[in-house]
Amino acid sequence: MTVEPAPYDVVALVRDPLAGMGVRFLLSEADRIRDVALRCQVQDLHNGTVPDTCAAPRRPTVAVLGVDLPPAQLRRICDRWPTLVVASATAMSSALAAVRCGARSVLVAAATDPAEMRIALNAVVSGGIHLGRGLQWAPAEPVRAVPARTGSVAAESRQLPALAPREVQTLRLIARGLTHAQAARELGLTAATVDTYVKRIRTKLAVGNKAELTRRAIEFGYVPAQLAAPGS
């Protein structure tokens, strides 16, 4: 017997009514949402009382943050509700800092559409982690190749392989331990499309199996080591 996914409520914290309209648009394709409560309380942000003023008629399942909060305030919200952050910053380091505070999904405001929001919300309510497109790695120094086994000790510079946004999303899901079919459902794609993406990724990263794929993804900075599946 098929069990229908449970509906959930959302409390969205935004800076102003215009931002609230934007968040409502991004939530428009998430058909499992039962109710949305918008909160525009900038003064409460300054006072550090955000979690105490976000009361909703029903306890929400997901908090969607359309504001950039200090770590202490973000941690308080993440401790109370499963949280999705819509950030203005595009740096991957900022997204990982939000994850360390307890956020389950981080999206870049300028690169997010309703379909991406739906994927991120599904990850949040299922206990997963989703890092949206638009996040960028900025390595402090060029990635160096491992010396070849020919006796040469000089490590040659290696260019970061250019993966398309969908390929990066696929890579992150596979590195987390999802099967191709599970990744396809998460991304709203067919399994055949994910198979094609994985083949392209393996070619670009020059790997032959999943373990090598995950290691190379971490090495190049596409996937944080702490988000990879155990044993990868």
Image (cartoon, rainbow, N blue to C red):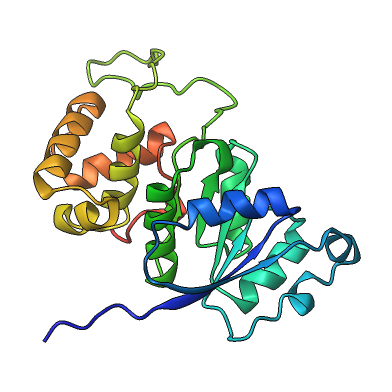
Q: Please name the residue shown 58% across and 85% down the image.
A: 59
Q: Please name the residue shown 70% across and 81% down the image.
A: 55
Q: Please name the residue shown 90% across and 66% down the image.
A: 47
Question: Residue 5: where, in percent of width, then height?
Answer: 30, 77
Q: Please name the residue shown 65% across and 55% down the image.
A: 20
Res 176 visible: yes
Question: Residue 182: where, in percent of width, then height?
Answer: 20, 59
Question: Residue 228: where, in percent of width, then height?
Answer: 36, 54
Q: 220 or 157: nearer the eye?
A: 220
- In this view, 59 is above or below 31: below
**Which quarter of the image is occupied by the N terminus?**
bottom left
Q: Is 25 displayed left or right of 166 in the figure?
A: right
- In this view, 36 is above or below 168: below
Q: Quadrant of residue 108?
A: top right
- In this view, 9 is above or below 38: below
Q: 47 or 60: nearer the eye?
A: 60
- In this view, 195 is above or below 66: above
Q: Is 107 displayed left or right of 123 in the figure?
A: right
Q: Quadrant of residue 130?
A: bottom left
The number of callouts visible is: 0
Res 232 visible: no
Q: Is 171 displayed left or right of 116 in the figure?
A: left
Question: Residue 111: where, in percent of width, then height?
Answer: 50, 37
